[in-house]
Amino acid sequence: MRILVSLCALALVGSGVAWAQVELVDPDAPQPEETTAPGKAKKKKAPPRVIAPDAEADDPSAAPPEEELAGDEPDDTADLPRPKITPRPDAGVKDVKKLAPGTRDLFAEPPKPVVEKRPVPAITSAPVSDADFATAWQVWKKAADSKDVKAEQAARKGLLELRSRSGAEDVELHAIGLLRAATLAEAAGDSGAAVEMAVSASELAPHLPAAWVGLARAYFQADPSEVGRTLEAFSKALSRTAEDPRYLRPLVADLSTVVLLALVGVAIAVVAVLFLRRARYFFHDFHFLFPRAAARWQTSALAVLLLAVPIVFRLGVVPTLLALFAASTLYLSVKERVVAVVLVGLLGAVPLLGALVVQQTAFAETPAEDMYRIERGGPGVGPLVERYEELSQADKVSFPEHAVLGRYYVRRGQLDLAATHLRLALSLKPDDVPCKVNLAAALFFGGDLENPRAILESTQSSGSAVALFDLGRVYKRRIAVYGDNVAAEVDKANSALAAARDLDGTLPPLGSEELTAPTTGNEYLRTLPLPRGELLALARSPEAAARVRSQLSQILLGDVPEWAAPYYPLAVALLLLAVGLLGPALEAAKACARCGRPVSRREDPEVSPGSVNCTQCVNVFVKKNAVAPSMKVRKQLEVARYESRVGKVAYGLGAVWSGMGHVFSGMTIRGTVYGFFFALAVLAVVMRQGVLRAPYEPLPTLVWLFPVGLGLAILYLATLRGLRKRQG
């Protein structure tokens, strides 16, 4: 009997131990009440111990409190070290699938341990505000006023470091200030300080043409014999002018305006000279349209009034030229008519060309200029950013504004705003590479090393050097932080950086010091600006182009329907060209080849139809002994006076407007070409200030005024000499 009781007691003890093991492994299982032997106190059980995957075994904070483990019986092993035991998950289990649902997860594979990060220098992205630039400028100004050379140099260096940390491409305001200070230093005789300040100005605003113009001036004033460095600085000014739309577009607008005005001027001049050359014959034939009782002065006055109708009623330039062309077309040669048709037809296209110039060159006071200034990232754009931020809150901006604001905030260290705007931009254009690159930079500066890698890897096929460069540096950073855990990314980093350097040799290599010394985000990664095409699309102003087209059309073409305005000058000119071919059939007067008198059968029926000489010249120079010798001498003097008069008029026209003497003398095409280039050079000199102004300081006027003036002088003298030689 005692043996049977002992076996039952042993079975009860074994079942209690089994329940205790299930409760420690599965805290979610129901907890049954424990039965204790009579006469013994109930012992408190410790709750299941949950240890984080990266917690240390000897962490005292991870152990349960001592009072929860204490019982009535003392624990003699409390002071002994307890070894850390890691039981096998599948110990004693042959088929995990047959376990109860509450205990099945306990035997799953444990999660992989979190990779410990190495202690590497942080990449800071501290916000930089306009106030920081203002403070740095005041420090420099105070040092410059105190004549402390070392302090002044240190302050200039601080400005350059602040530009680098802010990510600003150009600090234009402070660069212009340094150029003005350099001018004062040069005036005070300190050429060395002037050159140093000008050099710092070019470093503060390397994309600003005015900075390089100022540096070239400082070099020349300091030592005119050093032509090489002066020309180098000036060549950079020219290249920056071609890259900066604030300078390039006004330059293109000025040149286009000069070309269009020269075209209008040479058209007026050539048609007027052609009419002047043949007006005598027009008035001669016009007289025969009236009764014989009418005097010539009366018919001539009526002809002048008829030709003045477009001017009196302000019908426009083209109707006036068409009236002159219509009056002279019967008496012009085919070559002269063709030149007149081309010039008048081109005037019909001038309003369209003017509107096109406005569309392609407008930039100032447009959203494009605002975005371009924000893209530069320098101080002074805070009010613009605030205005467009308000428009963004009201949902009144589109993709370009979001992209530009996002990049601005990235470089200024306002990462949350940057990510917000860039995500909005990508929602409008999901495949935009610059926005992806800039968003990756914003996340990277915030400490994220996973998402930037994935974003930049999605841009590898775009062929962007900056995207590959940033991807390589993100790989390098991950290698520095995670070590051997990302060893496979070493080759990827080297490959990306090598490809980026092949595409753009100006990208800096990644030196080993950048992994061992603190650096700023704007120095570590690059960001991409808004593509130039999308930026310039913001500068289009259809309203301004329509106004310019309307004004030019009213001045040149008159009050005609808009759809017909560009085409009617050419159509009417072609019609007059066809009328001119009917001159022989209409028996229009011709110029006598010797004395210039009209040859007309209406006035002299004895003239043969194909004769090129008047009746007097035929009797004097063709027929023998038809007139007395005195009459022959008198006619020869008349011919000489006519030739002298024509020569003087031609030379006078050539002296007033190069090429017009050639047109009057019958060399129409050559004279038209000369006249166009002459008008081009004169207008370039007269309009040297331009129609649009560039910010700060444009290219020096003398730079382009000297070659234009030299070319004008050569053209003027060469045309006069050629005309004189032709007459001789």
Image (tube, rainbow, N blue to C red):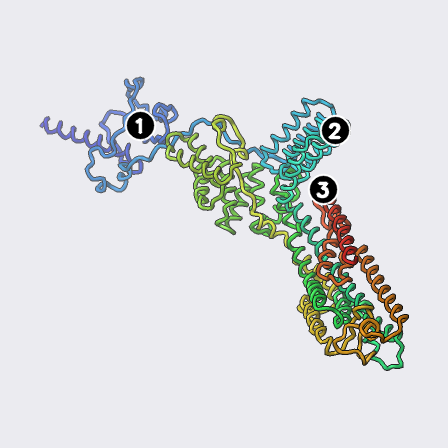
Q: Position of residue 710 (x, y in %)?
A: 74, 46
Q: Which residue is mark 3?
A: 703
Regarding residue 547, the answer to whether it shows in the image is no
> First in sequence: mark 2 or mark 3?
2
Q: Position of residue 342 (x, y in %)?
A: 68, 64
As shown in the figure, which amino acid type bears the numbered disc 1?
A: Lys
Label 2's element?
helix
Q: Which residue is mark 2?
A: 185
**Picture layout, residue 200 above or below residue 581:** above
Q: Which residue is mark 1?
A: 44
Farthest right residue in view: 630
Q: CA distance from mark 2 to mark 1?
A: 89 Å
Residue in view at x 69 percent, y 32 percent: 219
Q: Nearer the viewer, residue 664 or 393?
A: 664
* Crowding near the residue tagged with mark 3, few <14, some 14–19, many ≥20 C-alpha atoms within 10 Å: few
As shown in the figure, which amino acid type bears the numbered disc 2?
A: Ala
> First in sequence: mark 2 or mark 1?
1
